[in-house]
Image (spheres, rainbow, N blue to C red):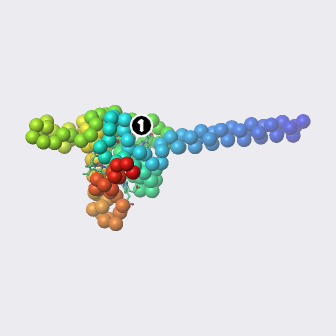
Amino acid sequence: MKQKRILRLTAVVFAVVFVAGITGLYAGTNVPDDIKMENKIYSKHTKGIATLSHKKHAEDYKIGCGECHHDEKGKKLTNLKAGDAVKSCAECHSKPGQAPKGADAPKLSKKEKIQQYHAESVHANCIDCHKDVKKKDKSKNAPTTCKECHPKKGK
Ligand code: HEC
Ligand code: HEC
Ligand code: HEC
Ligand code: HEC
């Protein structure tokens, strides 16, 4: 009798540990390892879709979450954990594409362009860091040219 109860108890403990393990795993895989940067604010992408190796950037390259994610004031979100909800860059940097160029384009400072236009904000984040990385060590694979990030369309 007693042995049966112990068995049942053991089964319950195992079940709890198992379920907790699964949900833990699930929370950890909320963010895809590689994010296809194909934001829905674009009705059409003019460039091939860039991929961000999100997991590699955070784990292998050891870049803090706050280097890319910040709050509505631009303050770094340094305490983010896997599974936390995160706002898309486009919720704040909400105009699609890059700031218009040319004589009749509105005159905007670099800061204003970044604040308003999605591609400007993403480029400033990704490319500025990659330039710094390359400056320190030319052998690093941190892409700075268009075609390294944007594959030929249709691929
Ligand atoms: C190199 C820059 C970078 C780093 C470092 C980084 N992220 Fe991200 N993360 C992004 C970008 C870009 C997106 C896509 C945002 C978008 O769609 O606008 C994203 C998306 C996410 C999402 C949402 C995924 C989805 O599909 O909705 C979560 C959650 C997230 N990141 C959490 C984190 C956490 C936690 C860390 C630190 C462990 C981290 N990120 C580190 C750039 C980064
Ligand atoms: C909740 C709103 C919000 C979200 C989400 C957001 N940003 Fe920002 N971001 C801001 C604000 C506000 C500023 C301006 C801060 C300032 O000028 O002091 C800013 C500034 C920036 C800058 C300029 C920083 C500098 O130091 O010059 C870059 C680059 C940038 N954001 C990229 C991103 C990227 C990439 C994402 C997504 C991973 C993102 N932002 C998500 C609100 C946001
Ligand atoms: C704060 C610094 C930083 C930011 C921000 C950053 N990266 Fe990187 N990135 C790196 C480093 C470091 C490497 C790896 C260099 C090496 O070790 O060879 C890298 C490598 C890459 C590579 C080539 C290798 C791979 O893992 O695929 C791609 C593509 C890339 N980054 C895309 C992006 C994109 C897209 C963004 C913006 C959404 C971004 N990165 C933002 C630092 C950064
Ligand atoms: C470090 C990687 C990286 C480099 C280098 C880069 N881009 Fe981007 N670019 C991105 C990402 C990521 C987005 C955001 C796409 C999204 O989230 O939908 C983007 C968005 C864009 C967009 C708006 C979306 C579209 O397809 O119409 C244009 C236009 C663009 N880039 C042009 C360029 C040009 C031109 C260059 C070279 C001068 C360049 N990019 C270099 C990563 C990069």
User: Quick one: SS at disc 1?
Assistant: loop
Total marks drawn?
1
The residue drawn where x is 67% and y is 41% is: 18
| Whether residue 126 is situated above or below residue 71 in the rendered picture | below
x and y percentages locating residue 86 in the rendered image? 42, 37
Q: Which residue is the extreme one toward the left?
A: 103
Q: As drawn, is 22 to the left or to the right of 51?
A: right
The residue drawn where x is 38% and y is 44% is: 37
- The crowd level at tag 1 (other Cα within 10 Å; few <14, some 14-19, many 20+) is few
| Whether residue 66 is situated above or below residue 42 in the rendered picture | below
The residue drawn where x is 53% and y is 43% is: 28
Nearest the viewer among 53 and 18 is 53
x and y percentages locating residue 126 in the rendered image? 32, 50
Nearest the viewer among 39 and 9 is 39
The answer to whether residue 64 is seen in the rendering is no
The residue drawn where x is 54% and y is 40% is: 27
Among the 4 quarters of the image, the one containing residue 4: top right
Nearest the viewer among 29 and 74 is 29
Mark 1 residue CB less than 8 A from any atom of ligand 1: yes
Among the 4 quarters of the image, the one containing residue 137: bottom left
Q: Label 1 sits on what residue type?
A: Val
Q: According to the image, label 1 marks what residue?
A: 86
Q: Which residue is the extreme one toward the front?
A: 154
Q: As drawn, is 152 to the left or to the right of 115?
A: right
